[in-house]
Image: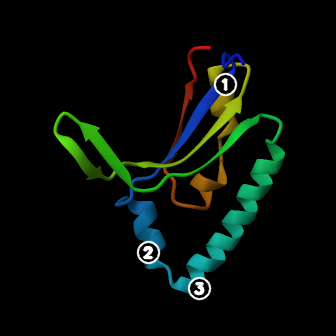
Amino acid sequence: MSTADHYLAVFTSNKTGPKWRAWYAMSEAEQAARAEIGVAAVKAWDEAHRDVIVYQGAPLGPTKRVSDDGITDVVNELTVFMVVRAESHAAAARIFEDHPHCTIFVCDAVEVMPLLGA
């Protein structure tokens, strides 16, 4: 399988940034209402883009870094990933404009990169 037209999208979120501070400032009821709207919007986005989604991906959990210094727990901005198909790098990036993870939920950005090889 060629990956020439496949792109990895990684959603990022600064867990100490303004979007998270605003989220935590909401009441539990406000968070639940926002989450309900967000989940419906993500499902609608997924359905609208199902023809270009190669791998749905998943949320990312706690991170361990393995280096010459050993194994340590780290916090990074990586929150969700998926793989899409597009005719170009720019076209792949445009797929994620106004994504609900960034407009409703607390993601700050989506980083899109080509999968190289095969």
Q: Amino acid at mark 3?
A: Ala
Q: Nearer the viewer, mark 2 or mark 1?
A: 1
Q: Residue at x 56, y 77 (%)?
A: 31
Q: Secondary structure at mark 2?
A: helix
Q: Secondary structure at mark 3?
A: helix
Q: In the rendered image, which quarter is residue 97 located in?
A: top right
Q: Quadrant of the N terminus?
A: top right
- The residue carrying mark 3 is 29
Q: Secondary structure at mark 1?
A: strand
Q: What is the basis of the colouring in this image?
A: rainbow
Residue 24 percent across, percent down from the top left: 43, 74
Q: Position of residue 34 (x, y in %)?
A: 63, 72
Q: Which mark is residue 6?
A: 1
Q: Position of residue 107 (x, y in %)?
A: 51, 53
**Amino acid beneath label 2:** Tyr
Residue underneath mark 2 = 24
Mark 3 vs mark 1: give the one in front: 1
For the point 40% across and 68% down, the residue is 21
Mark 3 to mark 2 CA distance (whole Å): 12 Å
Disc on the earlier residue, 3 or 2: 2
Around disc 1, counting alpha carbons within 10 Å, would you say few (fewer than 14), some (14 to 19), or many (20 or more)?
Answer: many
Q: Is residue 41 above or below residue 4?
A: below
**To which quarter of the image does residue 95 belong?**
top right
Numbered-mark total: 3
